[in-house]
Structures are given as structure tokens and as C-alpha cells.
Amino acid sequence: MGKYTNLPEFNIDYQYLTEMSFSVEGAGIDGGRNGEGDSPAIDFSGGGKIVGSYSVFAAEPEQHEMLNQLAARLNGSTRCIVVPIFTDRIGPFPLLGTHDPQPLVSGIPHSDGALFGDGAGYSQATVFGTFESAAALNAGQIVVNIFGAARNLRWSDWLSTYHEMRGWRAWRYWEASDPVEVTRTVEGQEYTGQQYTLAISPPLREAVEAGQRIELARPRFVARFPRGFNLPWEVKAPFHSQIAVNFVEAEVR
């Protein structure tokens, strides 16, 4: 198992999440005082790191087991896990007959119409993207194609891609161009969508190729516990836990 690839994912679907927080820290450093006595910031190579937190309420035995497994794996900040960002309610996802955005569709059968033995089917994202052109390590501007979106990319959304060496990495954009309609063939199927030029933060953690896939449904990144953070197993009557789990993006340089 690679240090950043082929990692397990923090299962947010089976936890009661009461609060979350995600940001990018350390994207700039002090540039020294100018003639007016101000200290303007300057960009920092690598663009800072993603930091995140989920407040988890555990009541079921399996939820306690999963928190213990998470602590056993990540306490000490030497091992990593994939952390999804819960963007289900704000992404450009279709409603599909409901009042809530639908980032994923499930119950998709095999080609012969059959489901799995337990009655479940495959699931897939309703919205995805690709890189229109190759981009270098630390690129802060990318050209992407987005397919299946129910709205244009506008103020900001989180996205992610899977790198061969760095594994899953996420970013959000702070500026998006006006969309241009495009039609592209992805894995043998033709899709029509919108093309954008995005200014992103943090920048790319590894070079990407044209056509590489981009995820908007539950964008995710490789993370570990921050140094000094320890996840204890704390239980209150009647046998429940409520605790904040903190993450920091794994090494970026």
C-alpha cells in the first residue's frame, strides 16, 4: 500500500455528523514591511494545506468501533486516510425529482438488469469533469470540462482528482471564466458540457494529463491527524460519544 495511494476512506455516511469545517491554511507568508509600515502577504510555494474537521456523534456499536479504528490508524500522525468533503447540499448537482441535490445515483443494475445479491446496485456521480489540457505541478490555473451540472460554476465549489503518486487531492476555485459549451468523448461515450478556466487554491499537487477525471461529488483528499492531535475514545451515558475529528492534508512537497 502506497503512503498516499490505495488508502481507506473515512466513512462519513455511517457517522452522525453534527458539524464540519474545511479551509486552506498557510497560503501566504509575511512579505516584510513596506515604506508605509504595512506587511503585505506574498504567495507561498505550494499554496498552503487543506485543514478540516468533522464533529461526530457516535451511538451505535459499529460507530464506536469505527472511531476506535480511526484512532488506532491515525494517532501519532504517521499514517494517512482519504477524507471526503461533504458538499452534497451546495454542489452543482441535479435535483432528480427531490428537493435536495443528488451528487450520486445508486441502484444501477448490471448490464443484464440484475442487482447484487443484497439487492443493491452500482452507484455513480451525477456530475464529473475532465482536464481539457495538461497542467504542471503547482499550477494555479486549470482548464476543465464539466458534465451533468445543473448550474454553472460560479462563486466556488470544491473539486478533486486522483494523482498517481500523491493520491486524492482537492482544491476550490476563487475565480471561474464564463462557460463555453463543449462536446468530448470520455471512456468511449460522448458528453456535452461546459468548459471553464479556473483559478484554484491550493494549486495542483502533481502534474495532470489532458482527459484526467475530476470529481465534484464528495471531493476528497489524503490527510492525517495534525501534529499534537490525539483522538481518544470518550463515552458518556447512555454509551454515546461526541467528539471533533481534525485532519490536515498530507505532505504536499
Image (spheres, rainbow, N blue to C red):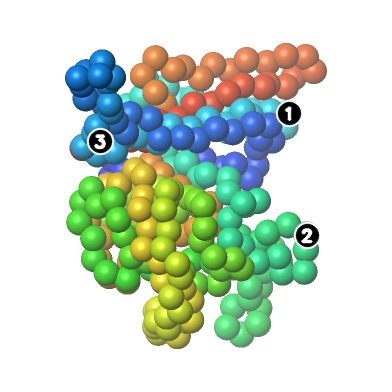
Query: Splitting the image into 4 quarters, where does residue 161 fall?
Result: bottom left
Nearer the camera: disc 1 or disc 2: 2
Q: Is residue 227 visible?
A: yes
Which amino acid is tagged 1?
Ala
Residue 19, given in percent of the width and then of the height, sits at 64, 31
- Number of the label disc, if any, that sits on residue 99: 2
The residue where tag 1 is placed is 59
Residue drawn at the location 72% of the way across and 22% of the way down: 240
Q: Mark 2: which secondary structure?
A: loop
Q: Position of residue 228 (x, y in %)?
A: 39, 14
User: Which label lies toward us, 2 or 3?
Assistant: 3
Residue under label 3: 43
Where 107 falls versus 141 (above or below)? below
Q: Please give the name of the residue rendered at 24% of the width and 32% of the height, measured from the top-left corner.
A: 42
Tell me which label, 2 or 3, sits earlier in the chain.
3
The quadrant in which the N terminus is found is top left
Contact between marks 1 and 2 (CB within 8 A): the answer is no
The C terminus - image quarter: top left
Q: Is 201 situated above or below 92?
A: above
- Residue 178 spot, x, y in % from top left: 45, 67
Chain-order first, disc 3 or disc 1: 3
